[in-house]
Amino acid sequence: MRRLIMWNLVTLDGFFEGPFSWEIDWHDYVWGEELEQFSIEQSKSADMLLFGRVTYQGMAAYWASEKGEIADFMNNIPKIAFSRTLERAEWNNTRLVKENAEQEVARLKQQPGKDLFIFGSANLSSTLTEHGLIDEYRLGLTPVVLGGGNPLFKASPTRMRMELVEVRPLKSGCVILRYQLERK
């Protein structure tokens, strides 16, 4: 059975982007050799990426013309864009799913293969979290307070207790935190 891992950089005040869509210039505060190596390392355990519409469009616009090992990974790995409004998904190796994200992800998790990753995509992540489909939350805690923006974790009627799996501090001040739902 495959695992679904959510990976995001997040600010100290809990935002994954600023007040405007795709406002992530603060990623540059921590991007460097260590975070790049971590990204390459974790890419080796993945064989598919999942995106909501906004993140899909931003990632496609950015990575389609980039070069290097991470760009090769991003451009070549199979991807799914979940959107009710997109007419087509044109980024290399992308399939569009318009309905029932939770059913499609549950089906994908039952198939053999490597890990599934979801980047950005806070609304999609919220839906998948609600349905208990995310197996691990990987957060790159970035030493910045934005004071406002789009929260990574959306309001929910359910409290989730997490169990710490790993802490990895980087020289940039970023701390990689790995969590899974607390086992009862």
Image: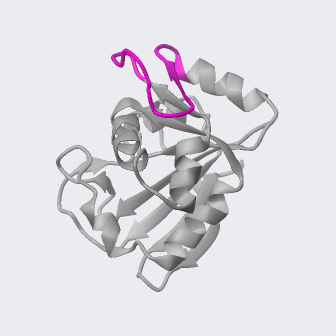
Q: Quadrant of residue 89?
A: top left
Q: Looking at this rendering, what residue extends furthest in the bottom direction?
A: 171
Residue 48, compared with residue 27, is above or below; it is: above
Give 124 or 54, whichever is nearer the viewer.
54
Q: Is residue 13 visible?
A: yes
Residue sitting at x 75%, y 39%:
2
Residue 117 visible to the viewer: no
* Quarter of the image that includes the N terminus: top right
Q: Main secondary structure of the magenta part?
A: loop
Query: Tell me, what colour scheme is on the image?
Result: one colour
- Side (left or right) of 46 relative to 20: right
Q: Residue at x 71, y 53 (%)?
A: 45
Question: Which of these two is toward me, 69 or 42?
Answer: 69
Does residue 96 appear left or right of residue 27 in this picture?
right
Viewer-closest of 77 and 45: 77
* First to last magenta residue range: 83-101
Q: Position of residue 124 (x, y in %)?
A: 44, 32
* Point 60% across, 40% down: residue: 134
